[in-house]
Amino acid sequence: MVLIFKSTRVSLEKSVEKSELAGNAVTFLHEEDYLEQYKHPKIDAETTIDPGLRKPSDIGKGWHFCIDPYDTGLRQKWFKYKKNPNQPQDYDPFEGSDYSIPMVWNLTKPEWFYYEGSAWYSKTLKDPRNNFDKEKCDRLILEIGGASYSCRIFIDGVFVGVHLGASTPCSLDITEYIRFSEVSLMICVNNSRTRENIPATHTDWFNYGGIHRNIFLYQVPNHFIQRTIVRLTKDQNFIEVIVKMNKKNKLPIKAYIVISKLHTNKEFKIENGEGSVIIEKVPQLWEPSNPILYKVDIKAGNDFWQDNIGFRVITAKGQQVFLNGRPRRLDGISVHEDDLMNGRITSEEDIRQRFKHARELGAIFIRLAHYPHSPMVARIADEEGLLIWSEIPVYWTLDYENPNTVKDANNQLKELIRRDINRASIIFWSLANETADTDARINFLSILANTARSEDPTRLLTAACLINQETLQISDRLVEHIDVIGVNEYFGWYDPEIQDLELFLKHYKLNKPLLISETGADAVAGHHGNIETLMTEEWQANFFENQIKILKKYYGASGPLIGITPWILYDFRSPRRQREYQNGWNRKGLIAEDKTTKKVAFQVMADFYRGIHPE
Ligand code: GCU
């Protein structure tokens, strides 16, 4: 093959040979701006559907998978592939072993452990409507619970759209793309860290790649309920329900809501694609000690949506947080979504085990760090009566002045809020973690704060702020935009002077609730010694005892500290930690990465939450 390059840009079509694979495969080898054509349309918060308790068809079995380190697939348009035994081809979506989704490639083959780049999932769907009742199946919704980081969908050779964000749903109506009874579905996922991503290139957790949550199909009628909000009214006396349909209707549609436990059955109207209704009934309030949920059934036209809803009120006044009008102390713990064997993939069993350990610690409050966790987490917390801090990965240094970064963060926040808007257990949305107070960053976060307020005026906003090390005070302009001040403090670990913790708490005069959103120290489980030996369990236990001697004087009723989420329940993977005792792990867990071995510090915190603490 001879290529003729001239000083001026030549049209490559003329100077290279033809190839059947996809237009002219060789041409694409020379086009470096190949990604431009795959940046739109966006699959985002506007296309997302809230399935409620709709029954999905799980299409996670039987996928062909391969990594694609040089993005050859997008360059040469592998999704245009036509089987041709006489043609040399770089990729065949129909060959090779099958993989199941959810899957993270890092733990699938040793050589893929640190792989960052593109990878392809390919599958032929026999008439996707087969799984559903034909006459009712007007439209098909594809939902990928989480794909890290970008996710590009191709159906029968057509680029459908791209979703950005590793931990929020990629969800859209794919009906118009389903033209045949046999459908080729190809998904290109890329977990490369870039400066303009959320999070950006530097994190203290493992950058798993892949479709790490379920991939579902939902059948819905032509005109269906896309989103629903069910909550107490502003005056907290009654229930308000807001329903948004997938498209506007010219004529009003009759809708009905049934809440059987409240003996409620009320008709209302859907006009121009929206409808709302007030139910003048007073539900029993959801409480951690009595997490009562109401089955809410809504019928609009010939669509039917239902969910289990807990009704509660979360407010802040002065330095206290009130749940249902009563001040609460948020004894908590931080958790990552990470597993020794399954990486970012979680399960109902894994979540319930996490909550069981949290309960054993005496925690009723869970900080889901540093990104949106599986939708199962808040659903199970609703059932079990736990309170949740939920956050988007605005973490450390981002490209705050980049409009793409702002759009990405804003969209991930909207996707998170719209996914979990009906979850009683979630009381805080957190906007940021340890971000330096600059003009660009405060402009960026004020946009996010406005988005959160308009999407959901009922929950409190928070963030994990940094303490000013000179003044030992919070001097972060972000405090004006949030309701509850989270503070990551490591006095006695990264900051050697533990007494500075007391100075900070004494200085704290903001008229907003304060909670310690991180504090902790590393220890290798099973490594024992005296309290002077770093990395021993005894050193870590002594760290918490020293913290507690100070925290207890400012905690709960004595204020201003209303909560603590120690860092962290389990050891977790972090590639930036390669010292011999870390070996790619962050060892601040109160339990080892086996999610079984408790360290001595676990009991120190458990005693503290039960009111037993060192004098
Ligand atoms: C920071 C950061 C965490 C990190 C922790 C640590 O506070 O928010 O993500 O894991 O410190 O250093 O262990």
Image: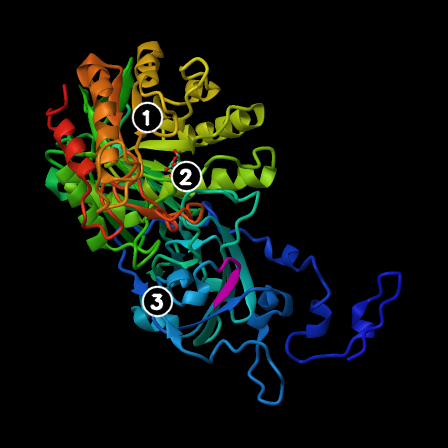
Q: CA distance from mark 1 to mark 2?
A: 28 Å
Between discs 1 and 2, the one toward the N terminus:
2
Badge 2 crowding class, 10 Å Cα cut-off, few under 14, some 14 to 19, many 20 or more, is many
Q: What amino acid type is highlighted by mark number 1?
A: Gly
Labelled pair 2, 3 in contact (Cβ < 8 Å):
no
Which label number is shown at residue 60?
3
Above-or-below relation of 18 to 568? below
Between discs 2 and 3, the one toward the N terminus:
3
Residue nearer the viewer, 280 or 169: 169
Q: Is mark 3 within 8 Å of ligand 1?
A: no
Which label number is shown at residue 249?
none
Badge 3 crowding class, 10 Å Cα cut-off, few under 14, some 14 to 19, many 20 or more, is some
Between discs 1 and 3, the one toward the N terminus:
3
Q: Quadrant of the N terminus?
A: bottom right
Residue 363: quarter of image: top left
Q: Quadrant of the C terminus?
A: top left
- Does residue 286 show up? no
Q: What amino acid type is highlighted by mark number 2?
A: Ile
Above-or-below relation of 329 to 387? above
In the image, the segment drawn in magenta is 115-120
Which structural element holds mark 3? loop
- Residue underneath mark 1: 492
Which structural element holds mark 1? loop
Left or right: residue 77 versus residue 119 is right
Which label number is shown at residue 392?
2
Location of ligand 1 given as a quarter of the image: top left
Labelled pair 1, 3 in contact (Cβ < 8 Å):
no
> Does 288 appear in magenta?
no
User: Tell me, what colour scheme is on the image?
Assistant: rainbow
Q: CA distance from mark 1 to mark 3?
A: 47 Å
Where residue 256 sits in the image (x, y, percent)?
24, 45
Residue 78: quarter of image: bottom right
